[in-house]
Amino acid sequence: MSAGLLLKVVAGLATATLAAVLLEHYGLRAVSSPRPARLHTAQRPFPAPGAEDTNIFWGLQISDLHISKFFDPRRATDLEKFCSETVDVIQPALVLATGDLTDSLRRDRWGSRQFEVEWQTYYNILRRTRVMEKTTWLDIRGNHDSFNIPSLESSQNYYRIYSALRKHGPMHYIHKTPFGNYSFIYVDATITPGPKKPFNFYGMLNKKQMRKLFFLSKKSSLSNHTIWFGHYTTSTIISPAPGIRALMSSAIAYLCGHLHLLGGLMPVLHTQHPKGTLELELGDWKENRRYRIFAFDHDLFSFADLVFDNWPVVLITNPKSFLYSSSTHEPLERLFYSTHIRILAFSPSSITSVTVKIDDVYLGNAVHLSGPIFILKWNPRNYSEESHVIKVIVQDSTGRNKIVAHEFSIKGDIHVKFDFMPSFILLTDHYVVAQILFILIVVALQFLLMTFRHFRKIKLKGTPGCISLTIFSFNVLSKTDIFCYSVLFLNFYIALGPWFVGEIIDGKIGCCFSFGVLVDGHFFQGSMTYVIGIIQIFTVIIPLSAYLCWTLLLRCQGHTFSTHLRGRYLKAVPGHALAGLFYLCHLGCCVLLWKAYGTTALVFSPTYGWLALLAPILVRLAWTLSPRELRAFAVELRSHQGPDRQ
């Protein structure tokens, strides 16, 4: 089997496997928004949005606060202002604080533990602002809130002391109104016991938790609407069949945080599940000071993602955005029977004007109904064809103004879908993709080495080029026992052997493998470990193998380390510098391991500390290998190279 054909087979296998995964987890999910029921057969047209101030309530969401002992004290001061001024102005029925309430990171940002002072800061903000008396404050745990916690009963679990909710596990909160009940189901996917950073980046649900969530889902079926909320996106939750997305399919939306808008690279992370449930990741408070307002107006769900202290706050509740509509969960036909455009407008100063345009045609100024509700009479039948854009311009008495706009459709037969990247990020189970990639990479390396060792016989033709020399050098590596078996063992060990043994949790010795983490009698399935394993292969195993191949090629050309440097100094330096850079990167990983898990973990870490010592030994062996062991390869190579060619 030729090397080229072999590489094509491996690449084809990888592509086909990834395509299958993406088709299963994404391909059928980035669909257009479901069309509403046919208008003439509508069964839920009333009560339709009109000129009354009933059948409406609103709430807020805030996520990833990261109150820190060491960094950015304004996170806390701004949160206090949010709990006083913002909550006072908007007066939400409830506030969802969806995890990572505290930072729990040491000053070096890598070591992790719970700091009581951070929790005290958070609690004192809630107490001083009396926000729990003004609204229902539902604060839940995130992965940072569970760093380095041996058990829920541990004295280090400050969430049970200083939070407002102080509840673990699935929970059902019912918001009761004169026009119906609205269910809020909490998904607690945090890991218990809680490892140190980064091994709880993925959340996990066991069968018992899934059964409880299933029961709560059935119980909520009597409510007008159900919202699920949690810290993790569904793409970062590991759950048994039928999976967390299937379980929440009866909900109008799942509200979460965790991804921080990918550091600002994805300003909007929203999508829709196959059965119509919206998944709405909220940007972080930590750096971006984001929060969200959501509302149910005559059982039509709408929301807006906002920036703190940016007034006025405006939310158009009727007509709602078509992109965020679901005929499965909402009575969308009420849009057709509505009599008024409805807008929520908030500001610390009085609102002076609310101007409404549709398709850039001035429709009029909305009038104040009560509280933050503004209405403007309209005839939706005038907009029953195609889609239209509503724009609202709100100004307050201080001159501040806000412009909001979205596309709506009364007819409901336009084709829209969410952007590819947000859907891919939120709908793909990335730990599955990482697992498949990791296995494919490990198997491909083992397969290539064994194939070259037992079946591949190199016959150079003509003057060898770069590709031929690369294949030749890999062949030399595969047929030189000490290096072939070393690379095979290292690759095999990263796949199956323990990476390190140390205090995964303070006082609790654990063991880390590619396929999971074992600590204090608990085994957590591999997730982030596969990502780390892929990084380890591409920054250690492959660079080390490439450097050994290059060294053996030079040895076959008759060079030693000293003659090689003298003869081709300018060409030699970049190769050695690149290898040194990868080695320094590995040493940096050793330092991070030491900072995160202590000296014990570094001492008992075959894939970090031990490998840092083994790599220079292998390199030295390559440069000092007896010429007799390379004679056959050297003869083959020199027969195709001129005497002066190196």
Image: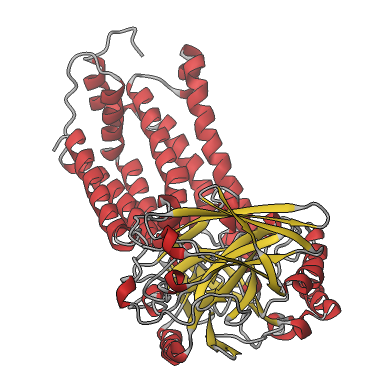
Q: Is residue 159 above or below residue 548?
A: below
In which image quadrant can residue 294 be found? bottom right
State the residue at coordinates (82%, 57%): 397
Task: Tell me if I can see residue 274 in this picture.
Answer: yes
Q: Work out which quarter of the rendered image holds the C terminus and state it.
A: top left
Front residue (pair 256, 518): 256
Residue 327 placed where, x, y %? 37, 72
Residue 429 placed where, x, y %? 39, 63
Front residue (pair 326, 434): 326
In which image quadrant can residue 386 be found? bottom left
Apparent side of residue 585 relative to residue 131 in the rendered image (left or right): left
Total marks placed: 0
Task: Tell me if I can see residue 110 in this picture.
Answer: no
Residue farthest along the right direction in this orientation: 128
Q: Is residue 330 above or below residue 566?
A: below
State the residue at coordinates (23%, 26%): 632
In which image quadrant can residue 467 be found? top left
State the residue at coordinates (47%, 35%): 620
Residue 570 placed where, x, y %? 51, 15
Apparent side of residue 285 relative to residue 410 in the rendered image (left or right): right
Residue 395 placed where, x, y %? 74, 55
Q: Work out which quarter of the rendered image holds the N terminus and state it.
A: top left
Front residue (pair 543, 275): 275
Q: Is residue 194 above or below residue 288?
A: below
State the residue at coordinates (18%, 29%): 458
Apparent side of residue 394 relative to residue 500 in the rendered image (left or right): right
Front residue (pair 609, 101): 101
Image coloring type: secondary structure
